């Protein structure tokens, strides 16, 4: 088993693995990542291989401070620097920005795009690892491609364990949903993926932003790779609360503490309650764990509660709608 505690010695060892072209899994405040040296093309290719990720889906580059940004993006026009400055309250934190990519960045990281997604995570272990390694770290979520993102070290080991030398164990992630992705490549910024930095907070900082909905068609999915409609799918079929459940016998329910957990026409064999009263921070924090837990017990169907698509609720609704996309085809 490659799960190790995040002692200084283990972080130094993980940093050495990264510098020598290997892969390391590490915690961030959002989800666990699987990282490689972003400047090393063959190291980055290993990420795509272990995840089974299509080469058309670009990676997020993680740096420890703003001082490291120009090495990833090249020199930025002052208009962009001003926008980044307005977002400084969210960095370090759960926000990824899509910016111009420096020509020196290997194109395997950006899947051939001229843009790159960059994030400064706030998690102390991620911060220490990036600083100790002294290189930018390209890291997607540490799950098999299109499965649920990992929020504990054990989740990483369950999905990718055999292919990783080290999984740094930081305990459960505090946020539990992947970062907000905001593109600054057009005059009006575009929210590509909702997350814990909310649309409302971004609009307060930057003014109007555009919200991209999940891609409906394959071609749109390629031009906006962060928006693949069917994603975060457990193996068990998923529907949102209120959808028909006839024909399924063993049904589990993930409750947000919003809808009743007992219903006279549906019997829920198992109920996981994420929050007693619809607290969305608690829902976000425990959602992926609950999906993984219910996916292991041989149910025919997982029903998920819903919430208003506002604030953090926009990110929660995005993830559960995508988890249900395969079932609703
Ligand atoms: O919270 C997170 O963002 C986690 C942690 C580990 O940092 N990472 C993560 O990475 O969720 P990943 O690869 O699972 O999701 C990154 C998303 C992908 O959907 C990818 O298509 C999109 O970001 N993306 C990356 N670069 C992009 C770019 N240049 N333009 C548009 N979307 C991009
Ligand atoms: Mg992912």
Image (cartoon, rainbow, N blue to C red):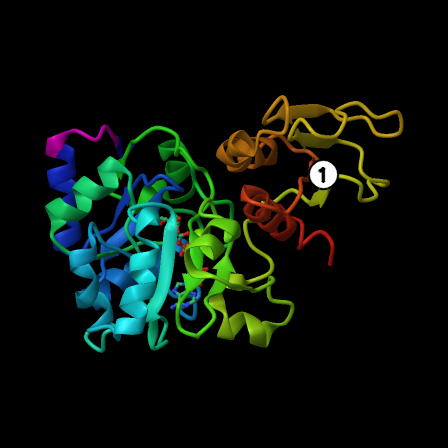
Q: Name the quadrant of the C terminus.
A: bottom right
Q: Toward the viewer: 110 or 257?
A: 257
Q: Secondary structure at mark 1?
A: strand
Residue 56's x, y, as percent? 43, 71
Binning the other alpha carbons within 10 Å of mark 1 as few (below 14), some (14 to 19) or many (20 upward) gives many
Query: Is the distance from the Cβ of mark 1 to the nearest ligand 2 atom less than 8 Å?
Result: no
Q: Quadrant of residue 260?
A: top right
Q: Which residue is mark 1?
A: 301
Residue 114 falls left or right of residue 321: left
Residue 125 placement: quadrant: top left
Q: Residue at left 36%, top 61%?
A: 97
* Res 128 → quadrant: top left
Q: Position of residue 186 (x, y in %)?
A: 43, 75
At a point 71% along the width and 37% down the height, the residue shown is 303
Q: Residue at x 58, y 48 (%)?
A: 314
For the N terminus, give its image quadrant: top left
Specify the farthest residue to the right. 265
- Vertical placement of 8 versus 211: above or below? above
Is residue 145 at least partly visible in the picture? no
Magenta segment: 4-9
> What is the x, y in percent for residue 103?
22, 78
Q: Is residue 136 above or below residue 75?
A: above
Residue 93 in percent (x, y) is at 33, 45
Q: Is residue 14 above or below residue 45?
A: above
Tell whether 283 sits left or right of 145: right
The residue closer to the viewer here, 252 or 299, is 252
Indicate whether residue 171 is drawn in magenta. no
């Amino acid at each position: 088993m490659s799960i190790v505690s995040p002692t200084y010695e283990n972080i130094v060892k993980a940093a050495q693995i990264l510098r020598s072209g290997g892969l390391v899994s590490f915690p961030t405040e959002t989800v666990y990542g699987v990282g490689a040296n972003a400047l090393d093309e063959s190291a980055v290719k290993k990420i795509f291989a272990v995840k089974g990720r299509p080469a058309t889906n670009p990676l997020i580059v993680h740096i420890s401070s703003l001082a490291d940004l120009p090495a990833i993006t090249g020199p930025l026009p002052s208009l962009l620097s001003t926008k980044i400055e307005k977002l400084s309250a969210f960095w370090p934190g759960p926000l990824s920005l899509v910016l111009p990519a420096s020509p020196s960045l290997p194109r395997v990281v950006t899947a051939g795009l001229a843009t790159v997604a960059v994030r400064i995570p706030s998690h102390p272990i991620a911060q220490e690892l990036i600083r100790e390694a002294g290189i930018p770290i390209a890291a997607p979520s540490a799950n098999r491609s299109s499965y649920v993102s990992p929020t504990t070290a054990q989740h990483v080991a369950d999905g990718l364990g055999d292919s990783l030398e080290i999984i740094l164990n930081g305990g459960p992630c505090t946020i539990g949903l992947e970062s907000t992705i905001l593109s600054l490549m057009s005059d009006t910024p575009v929210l590509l993926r909702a997350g814990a930095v909310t649309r409302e907070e971004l609009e307060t900082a930057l003014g109007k932003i555009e919200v991209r909905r999940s891609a409906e068609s394959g071609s749109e999915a390629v031009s906006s790779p962060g928006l693949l409609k069917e994603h975060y799918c457990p193996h068990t079929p998923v529907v949102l609360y209120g959808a028909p459940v006839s024909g399924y016998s063993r049904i589990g329910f993930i409750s947000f503490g919003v809808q009743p957990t007992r219903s006279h026409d549906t019997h829920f064999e198992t109920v996981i309650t994420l929050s007693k009263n619809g607290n969305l921070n608690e829902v976000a924090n425990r959602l992926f764990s609950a999906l993984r837990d219910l996916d292991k017990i041989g149910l025919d169907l997982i029903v998920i509660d819903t919430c208003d698509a506002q604030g953090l609720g926009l990110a929660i609704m995005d993830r559960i709608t995508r988890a249900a996309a395969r079932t609703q085809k």
